[in-house]
Amino acid sequence: MGPMADAQTQPANGLVQVPTSRAVLAYVRPGTDWYKYRTILIDGLRIPTTIREGAGKGKSTRFRESYVLRDADVAALQSDYDKAMRDALGKAGYTFVTTPGAETLVIAAQVVDLRLNAPAESSRLSYSSRGRVYSRGAGSVSVGAVLADGATWQVLAQIGARSYSADVWQINNSTTNRAEARRAFNKWARALSDRLVEKRTAGR
């Protein structure tokens, strides 16, 4: 069973809360040798069915409109997340593996909340007539994760869910929404990378 077996709502046994609300790592395992981790295994971003189907919670729809993410939408989000992580962590000096070892840090992330400010573009009544929809950003996405040792699968840290959303009025379509999701993932990945570098440097 992988590291995501630990629920995002409760810290894994032995983890201690980081004493600042601004910390990227909400809980960490005391005594962890962060310096030894040189490689990264990125577990694919998980987007549960309940999240896919609840993206429009509280929103009203018209005939045939839908807030449910399609398989293609999920695949695009997962691809953008993977690229953001590889870019940020690669620049920090980590290399990537598909088989974990003693020097591997496993990162398993999950979307824990997703809100869309407009129905999926392909389902809108105005889609066939190229009608435009404007909204204050695409919506918001909250991501949480656990970090585990590649050899033992012991959870070393748990990252509290962070929500990212834009606050500007703009056209709402698949292109702008995906660009906004990329910005969110890039910001999340850079914050995680900076924190890991900080802890790795402190362990020298």
Image: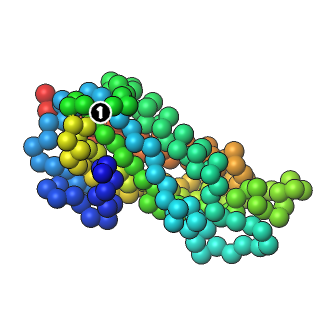
Numbered marks: total: 1
Q: Residues within 10 Å of mark 1 (few under 14, many from 20)?
A: some
The image shows residue 189 at horizontal and vertical percentages of: 41, 40
Which residue corresponds to the image point at 50% horizontal and 47% vertical from the top-left?
184
Q: Nearer the viewer, residue 167 or 92?
A: 92
Q: Nearer the viewer, residue 140 or 12?
A: 12
**Amino acid bearing label 1:** Pro
Which residue corresponds to the image point at 39% horizontal and 38% vertical from the top-left?
42
Q: Is residue 71 above or below residue 58?
A: above
Q: Quadrant of residue 106?
A: top left
Q: Can residue 201 be spotted in the picture? A: no
Q: Is residue 58 above or below residue 140?
A: below
> In the visual, does 132 lie left or right of 19?
right
Q: Can residue 147 be spotted in the picture? A: yes
The residue lying furthest to the left in this view is 31
Q: Quadrant of residue 190?
A: top left
> In the visual, does 165 lie left or right of 16?
right
The image shows residue 140 at horizontal and vertical percentages of: 53, 58
Which residue corresponds to the image point at 49% horizontal and 42% vertical from the top-left?
81
Q: Is residue 84 above or below residue 110?
A: above
The image shows residue 43 at horizontal and vertical percentages of: 40, 42
The residue that disc 1 covers is 100
Quarter the C terminus occupies: top left
Q: Nearer the viewer, residue 116 or 53?
A: 53
Q: Nearer the viewer, residue 12 or 60?
A: 12
Badge 1 element = loop
Which residue corresponds to the image point at 43% horizontal and 36% vertical from the top-left?
85
The residue lying furthest to the front in this view is 1
The image shows residue 103 at horizontal and vertical percentages of: 22, 30
Q: Quadrant of residue 31?
A: top left
> Which colour scheme appears in the figure?
rainbow
